[in-house]
Image (cartoon, rainbow, N blue to C red):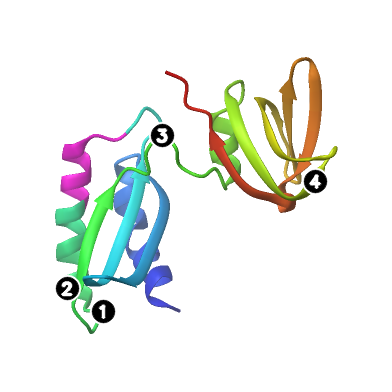
């Protein structure tokens, strides 16, 4: 089991107890050295105190378990409003909201789709724009994000 999978397994009980969703874990080399980054959220948004508490818990857990041999920086943050939608629950959470979707290949003649997410299935999403619905296969989505309107 690799480091990221082991850390996910160890942190799962804490996340469940605190109703925190693990959006992503990234462990990679960056300019300042190795970074272990946790992107977390809650159904109605996560606050700074919750991120801080998780960081403290993770720090102690990682020190105790001694999973990572080399020096690393631990970061815990929210993925932000413009986070990439990947999992079923990501799409389900934004049904009825506007999306921007880029595809690997043209779907109905376009690689860029903007519209309201009106349906989510295991294999497809359905986006409606100006009364026209487009079925987009999930495996053809290069990137899907919530359209942020100000």
112 part of magenta stretch = no
Query: Could you say where residue 25 lies in the image, as x and y percent from the top left?
Result: 39, 60
Of marks 4 and 2, the one in the foreground? 4
Residue range in magenta is 46-54
Q: Residue at x 16, y 47 (%)?
A: 53
Element marked by disc 3: loop
Image depth: mark 2 or mark 3 in front = 3
Judged left or right of residue 92, residue 76 is left
**Residue at 57%, 22% in the rendered image:** 97
Q: Which residue is mark 1?
A: 68
Nearer to me, 31 or 118: 31
| Helix, strand or loop for disc 1 | loop
Q: Position of residue 33 (x, y in %)?
A: 24, 74
Q: Is residue 117 left or right of residue 89?
A: right
Q: Earlier in the sequence, mark 3 or mark 4?
A: 3
User: Which quadrant, please, contains the N terminus?
Assistant: bottom left
Determine which residue is flagged by label 2: 64
* Eye-nearest disc, 3 or 1: 3
x%, y% of residue 90?
54, 39
């Amino acid at each position: 089991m690799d480091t990221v999978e082991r850390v996910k397994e160890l942190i799962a009980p804490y996340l469940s107890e605190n109703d925190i969703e693990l959006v992503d874990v990234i462990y990679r080399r960056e300019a300042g050295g190795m970074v272990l980054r946790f992107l977390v959220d809650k159904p109605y948004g996560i606050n700074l105190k919750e991120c801080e508490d998780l960081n403290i818990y993770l720090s102690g857990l990682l020190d105790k378990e001694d999973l990572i041999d080399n020096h690393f920086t631990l970061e815990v943050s929210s993925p932000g409003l413009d986070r990439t939608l990947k999992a079923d629950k990501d799409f389900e959470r934004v049904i009825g909201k506007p999306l921007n979707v880029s595809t690997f290949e043209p779907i109905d003649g376009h690689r860029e789709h903007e519209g309201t997410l009106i349906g989510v299935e295991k294999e497809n999403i359905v986006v409606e724009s100006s009364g026209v619905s487009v079925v987009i296969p999930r495996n053809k989505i290069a990137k899907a994000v919530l359209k942020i309107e100000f």
